[in-house]
Amino acid sequence: MSSRKLDKKVDSAFKFVGLAATLFGLVVLAALVVDVVSDGYHRLGWDFFTSFPSRKPEQAGIFSAWVGTIWIMITTAIFAIPLGIGSGIYMEEYAKRNRWTDFIEINIANLAGVPSVIYGILGLGVFIRLMHLDRSVLAGGLILALLILPVIILSTREALRSVPSSIREASYALGATKWQTIRHQVLPAGFGNILTGVILAMSRAIGETAPLITIGALTYIPFLPTNPVAFNKEIPYIHVSLQGFFDPFTVLPIQIFNWVSRPQKGFLADAAAGIIVLLTITLAMNAAAIYLRYKNQKRW
Amino acid sequence: MKQDVVIQIQGANSFYGKKQILKDVTLDIPAQTVTALMGPSGCGKSTLIRCFNRMNDLISNFRFEGKILYKGVDLYAKDVDITDLRREIGMVFQKPNPFPKSIYENVAYGVRIQGITDREFIDGVVEESLKKAALWEEVKDRLHESALSLSGGQQQRICIARALAVKPHVILFDEPCSALDPIATAKIEELITELKRNYTIIVVTHNTAQAARVSDFTAFLYLGDLIEFGPTARIFTVPQDKRTEEYLTGKFG
Ligand SMILES: Nc1ncnc2c1ncn2[C@@H]1O[C@H](COP(=O)(O)OP(=O)(O)OP(=O)(O)O)[C@@H](O)[C@H]1O
Ligand SMILES: [Mg+2]
């Protein structure tokens, strides 16, 4: 009897501690958000998005930073999404289970937990020293692609595994080949969950600073990467260029990092405004991921 | 009455890893009839029926020894095209498993994967198959709604229509009613009796009353052995083996 009572006490104590811990987290987060918003909101305006960084805090903006973030994200997506989903499909559906694939599997799971600076150092060695890509959009995008590749592979596999085997059996029983079954049934059924994983991975990449600083991404960039498409008056009127991928870049978190490390007070407001923008993007992406996950749960 | 034989099972042994399930099963399945595979849970009914369309190939530690001849051709021969085989021998599963797509797409799928794109042709196949599955009247106005929005019994009939769409000769049913209520069950049973005019049907069931209602021939399996096989009327009135009699009178299983 007495042990029953003790259990009950432990139970309610645990509930209390859990609630307190959760509230603590929420309060700290709310305080941070309120602090950042009150510091930065007055800087948010059209000018802030269309101005390059400047020596004068009240004229500085995030034009090169958000454009750079888009360039980097597109580059990252180009490499990480097909590679990640492709490997995920291969490992889950085609690879034979043996010691070799077990070894690869464990290592991919481990890679997902490696600190991002390590990827920066790897990128510095491979993309910059070895391949001479310099501190370019391409180098930065490739590093972030490597960083999120394991996450995309793992979430693809998870998504495919959660497709019920009854769906596969039904497809095979109608004379479908393995590829037809994967292409027409398994992938569409797992698509929502794969997309969720991809969005979460991209939202992680968007906030990464460490690996880009490791390769020496510049913090003061008062220009944009070359436009991929330019129009002019002579035939053929349109000019396509990949030069942008080889141009230097900055991204939002690096710009923010640069501003907070300045002594002038004014730059702190710029930094806070930058944080608001970055937070909004990240939260929007996470909300999209949560919505997709919720929508997919209702299917089976 | 002399019956044409469609499937001949000759000395079938099957294993999951080292565990033997089917033990030297030999059996001839007559054409244009309903054959029931009956027996207590775990006796190997599903294992046997899944040999006919080689569904067991999907299980990595499965092994098969012996012969299964379909119209005289060994299903387990090396040069058999397994996708062709599965179009000849269709299957309906225990739990209704429509694809998470529209009713139309569910039925059209088997035709589409053969590379057929002719819109009118596919429309025709969908309508014809749904009619054969006694579902057309219920769904003709909502062909593009999700198949998952249908009731369990309707979903199972979608699965039957889907199987019919690829024009099989044999249809395998693995306990098609075990997830359905009595009314939906009666509908499926009626459908099975209707379909046997044009198809050879094999039904797994551990419901003896169902076997008696729908089948012309009954095979009784027990612990992987084929105990008895013959016309259903005879099996149910004068079983030759004591174990069959005990099963039919509900002493076990
Ligand atoms: N994938 C598998 N791996 C190992 N053993 C299996 C596998 N599938 C089935 N078995 C075993 O094989 C035996 C026969 O299974 P089977 O599914 O053929 O029985 P069943 O007659 O269809 O039973 P039920 O009426 O319960 O469906 C059972 O003992 C089962 O545990
Ligand atoms: Mg079974």
Image: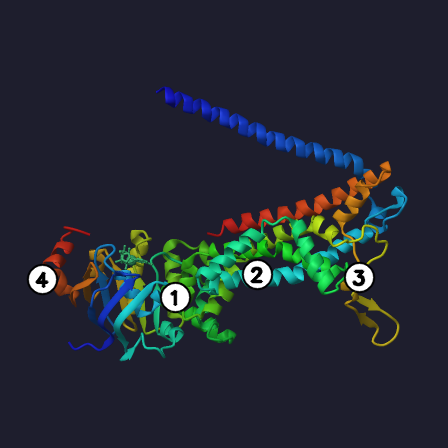
Q: Residue B239 or B177: which is nearer the viewer?
A: B239
Q: Which chain carries label 2?
A: A
Give the distance between the C-alpha atoms of the residues marked 1 and 2, in whole angstroms. Answer: 34 Å
Q: Can residue B102 be seen in this view?
A: no
Name the mark nearer the viewer: 1 or 3. Answer: 3
> What residue does disc 2 label?
A85
Mark 3 and mark 2 in contact (Cβ < 8 Å)?
Answer: no
Instruction: Specify how the rendered protein is coloured.
Output: rainbow
Give the distance between the C-alpha atoms of the residues marked 1 and 4, in whole angstroms. Answer: 37 Å
> What residue does disc 1 label?
B161
- The N terminus of chain A sits in image quarter: top left
Q: Residue A90 or A112: which is nearer the viewer?
A: A112
**Does residue A179 lie above or below A27 as drawn?**
below
**Does residue B27 lie above or below A56 as drawn?**
below
Q: Residues within 10 Å of mark 1 (few under 14, many from 20)?
A: many
> What residue does disc 4 label?
B238
Which amino acid type is shown beneath numbered disc 3? Answer: Asp
Q: Mark 3 lies on which chain?
A: A
Residue A247 circle label: 3
User: What residue is shown at x 21% (from left), y 55% (from top)?
Assistant: B40
Q: Which chain carries label 4?
A: B
Q: Residues within 10 Å of mark 3 (few under 14, many from 20)?
A: some
Indicate the quadrant where residue B177 lies.
Answer: bottom left
